[in-house]
Image (cartoon, helix red, strand yellow):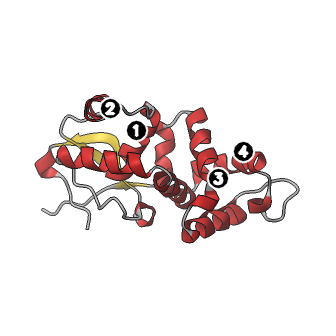
Amino acid sequence: MSKQAKFLPFHAINEFMLTEYRKEVIRTVLSNLSKLPENFQRKINGDIKRYVSVQGFRNSAQAPLPLKINGTILTFEKSADFCGHILAAWSLLNPELRSQVFDLLGERDWEVLPAETDRSVLPGFLTFWPGEENFETLLEAFRAKYPDSNVNDNDISLMIVWMSNRLPYETAPVDEEASVS
């Protein structure tokens, strides 16, 4: 009997995100777009031009930041590609947290792709977490490992989801995990 990995599209993460936090993530990415590698700038601007409608602008990517942010929220909620691009960009803008979460998950025997992998090209999120893990245990472990960190819980949780490429719909024993390859 072969095991097949089940994926949820990237925008399924919206079920786990508070509205204000979703807007904060989008604002962070769009206001720091120039700090991202060119390929991510092109992807995000192309997505905005293609999927987002800002009244008064033929090219929504040219709209002022507040209008662009408000216009992209619905696209983030509905488009797996756009959501994946925004999350990948957000992770690139938080390299220290990305590295810390990657190390934490590795120490806890999670199978994770290399930190620099562009997860936005994957089909979505895996639907299970290993063992008895949950956000509370992982946040507690992060705080114990990095006691001087002042990163908020939402950012840590989002990075855990992104780096592990998993949403906690179900748990699975570590030795029964399907591998992603």
Nearer the camera: disc 4 or disc 3: 3
Q: Are marks 1 and 2 in contact (CB under 8 Å)?
A: yes
- Compared to 48, does 19 lie above or below? above
Element type at mark 4 = helix
- In primary-sequence order, the first of circles 1 and 3 is 3
Question: How far apart in space, not on screen, are marks 1 and 3 (Cα)?
Answer: 20 Å
| Amino acid type, mark 4 | Asn
**C-alpha gap between disc 1 and disc 2:** 7 Å
Query: Which label was assigned to residue 70?
Result: 4
Q: Nearer the viewer, mark 4 or mark 2?
A: 2
Q: Quadrant of residue 57?
A: bottom right
Q: Residue at x 74, y 61 (%)?
A: 61
Asked whether disc 2 touches disc 3, contact meaning CB atoms under 8 Å apart, the reply is no
Q: CA distance from mark 2 to mark 3?
A: 27 Å
Q: Circle 1 sits on which residue?
A: 156
Q: Give the class, few, some or many, for how many residues have Cα within 10 Å of label 3's Cα (few <14, many ≥20).
A: many
**Side (left or right) of 61 relative to 6:** right
Specify the amino acid type for callout 3. Leu
Q: CA distance from mark 4 to mark 2?
A: 30 Å
Res 172 label: none
- Asked whether residue 165 is in view, the answer is no
Residue 54 drawn at (x, y percent): 80, 54
Name which of mark 1 and mark 4 comes first in the sequence. Answer: 4
Q: Pointer 3: what residue?
A: 30
User: Outermost residue toward the front?
Assistant: 148
State the mark number for residue 139.
Answer: 2
Image coords of residue 7 (percent x, y): 36, 56
The three-letter code of the residue at mark 1 reads Ile
Does the rendering let one see residue 143?
yes
Mark 2 crowdedness (10 Å alpha carbons): few <14, some 14-19, many ≥20 = some
